[in-house]
């Protein structure tokens, strides 16, 4: 019977987990796809690399989705068992929480191993590869936006740019002008040649106009100016410093995080540990949380479970910021958040079955260990 029970719980949990993971992944990827398509339409990235970026982002999402999806899968699976009175039948046969946890951890253990691989190795690689592909997409987009013979809006949509000819071999743009609005007044720059330049520190993208003219104001009004210049830089795209910092941290190899003493990198290391640990903790929490009366239905406790997960993830996010700002020591990290979840799971188990069950489970575990030890000596 016990082997049949293992197969039954493992099959039901895996099927539900895969379905929940697929639904959540589609939701996240659809939102990300809409964002990438909007950037492609705005000319910020090359449309041909959108799905490549999407595939790499899916790998990063999986390490974050796996703990939550397994948690919800266990809740839904046991919700159905309680609704159909199967849990009452199992209890009548002497199947308790310890026996159920054995079946659940046959699923949670390989999922934890998968999340460890994703969080510590595959995820950083996918993030770094995504940065490379995005840089290629932005470069290709900028080359397209400066294609000859076309009027194009700047990426901030505050100006119009025109290029007559692009000299790829010399890396120059010939006969170019741009019309902008600065401080409420129109301004136009025109030159025979220009080049693109990316600031190596900020990643901001500029167009450097050479030996040209700058026209400020309206020709029919007072204060109209014509200025001749040798070089004039115009900001084409401003990089997001917070986004760049986040992308850099998520792309750092785990071995470098272990060797670093920077608070931001230590916080990133604790964050990578959080995903596999949360798989085990949420598995512990899901069983007592899923207990329901048959009349409550399959989804009676799912809303409560989602709220608990939201609080758990948000508190981890706050604690991560505290580590980055030096308000939490490295030794504390995110461990106190995991400890609160573990204490909550233990409390719910004891509340559901009482202290007597806990003592009996502990005594039974000691008896099993003693029996195995005697068998080994024999």
Image: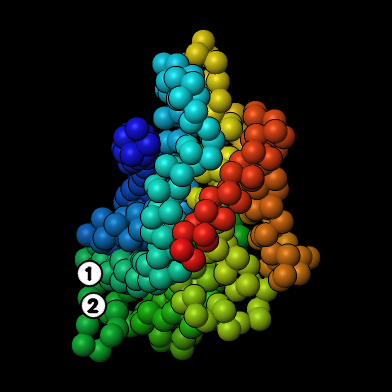
Percent x, y of residue 209: 41, 80
In this view, the residue in front, 153 or 265, is 265
Dot 1 falls on a residue whose secondary structure is loop
Vertical relation: 235 (above or below) 314: below
In this view, the residue in front, 63 or 354, is 354
Q: Is residue 62 visible?
A: yes
Of marks 2 and 1, which one's residue comes earlier in the chain?
1
How many numbered callouts? 2
Percent x, y of residue 117: 40, 65
Q: Residues within 10 Å of mark 1 (few under 14, many from 20)?
A: some
Q: In the image, what residue occupies the spot 22% across and 76% down?
A: 165
Percent x, y of residue 329: 76, 69
- In the rendered structure, the answer to whether residue 17 lies left or right of residue 46 reads right
Are dots 2 and 1 in contact, CB under 8 Å? yes
Q: In the image, what residue occupies the spot 49% across and 21% down?
A: 92
Q: In the image, what residue occupies the spot 53% across and 50% down?
A: 368
- In the rendered structure, the answer to whether residue 324 lies left or right of residue 59 reads right
In this view, the residue in front, 115 or 78, is 78
Task: Return the residue found at the far top.
Answer: 295
Q: Which residue is mark 2?
A: 166
Percent x, y of residue 195: 36, 82
The chosen color scheme is rainbow
- In the rendered structure, the answer to whether residue 161 lies left or right of residue 170 reads right
Vertical relation: 84 (above or below) 95: above
Q: In the image, what residue occupies the spot 69% across and 64% down?
A: 333
Q: Which residue is mark 1?
A: 148
Dot 2 falls on a residue whose secondary structure is strand
Report the Cα–Cα distance between label 2 and label 1: 6 Å
């Amino acid at each position: 019977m016990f082997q049949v029970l293992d197969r039954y719980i493992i099959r039901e949990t895996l099927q539900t987990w895969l379905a929940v993971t697929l639904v959540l992944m589609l939701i996240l990827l659809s939102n990300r796809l809409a964002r990438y398509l909007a950037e492609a339409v705005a000319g910020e990235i090359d449309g041909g690399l959108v799905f490549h970026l999407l595939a790499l982002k899916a790998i990063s999402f999986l390490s974050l989705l796996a703990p939550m999806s397994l948690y919800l899968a266990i809740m839904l699976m046991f919700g159905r068992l309680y609704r159909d009175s199967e849990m009452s039948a199992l209890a009548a046969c002497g199947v308790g929480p310890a026996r159920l946890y054995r079946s659940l951890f046959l699923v949670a253990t390989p999922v934890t191993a998968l999340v460890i691989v994703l969080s510590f190795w595959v995820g950083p690689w996918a993030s770094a590869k995504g940065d490379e592909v995005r840089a290629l997409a932005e470069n290709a987009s900028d080359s397209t936006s400066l294609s000859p013979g076309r009027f194009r809006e700047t990426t901030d949509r505050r100006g119009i740019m025109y290029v007559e000819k692009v000299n790829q071999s010399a890396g120059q743009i010939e006969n170019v002008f741009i019309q902008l609005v600065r401080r409420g007044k129109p301004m136009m720059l025109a030159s025979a040649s220009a080049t693109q330049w990316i600031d190596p520190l900020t990643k901001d993208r500029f167009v450097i106009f050479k030996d040209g003219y700058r026209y400020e104001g309206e020709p029919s009004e007072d204060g109209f100016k014509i200025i001749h210049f040798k070089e004039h830089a115009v900001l084409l795209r401003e990089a997001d410093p917070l986004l760049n910092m986040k992308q850099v941290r998520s792309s750092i190899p785990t071995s470098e995080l272990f060797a670093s003493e920077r608070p931001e990198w230590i916080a990133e290391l604790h964050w990578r540990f959080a995903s596999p640990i949360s798989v085990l903790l949420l598995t512990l929490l899901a069983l007592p949380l899923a207990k329901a009366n048959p009349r409550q239905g399959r989804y009676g406790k799912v809303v409560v479970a989602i709220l608990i997960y939201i609080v758990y993830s948000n508190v981890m996010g706050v604690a991560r910021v505290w580590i980055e700002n030096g308000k939490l020591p490295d030794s504390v990290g995110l461990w106190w958040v995991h400890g609160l979840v573990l204490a909550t799971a233990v409390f719910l188990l004891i509340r559901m079955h009482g202290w007597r069950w806990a003592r009996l489970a502990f005594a039974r575990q000691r008896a099993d260990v003693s029996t195995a030890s005697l068998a080994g000596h024999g």
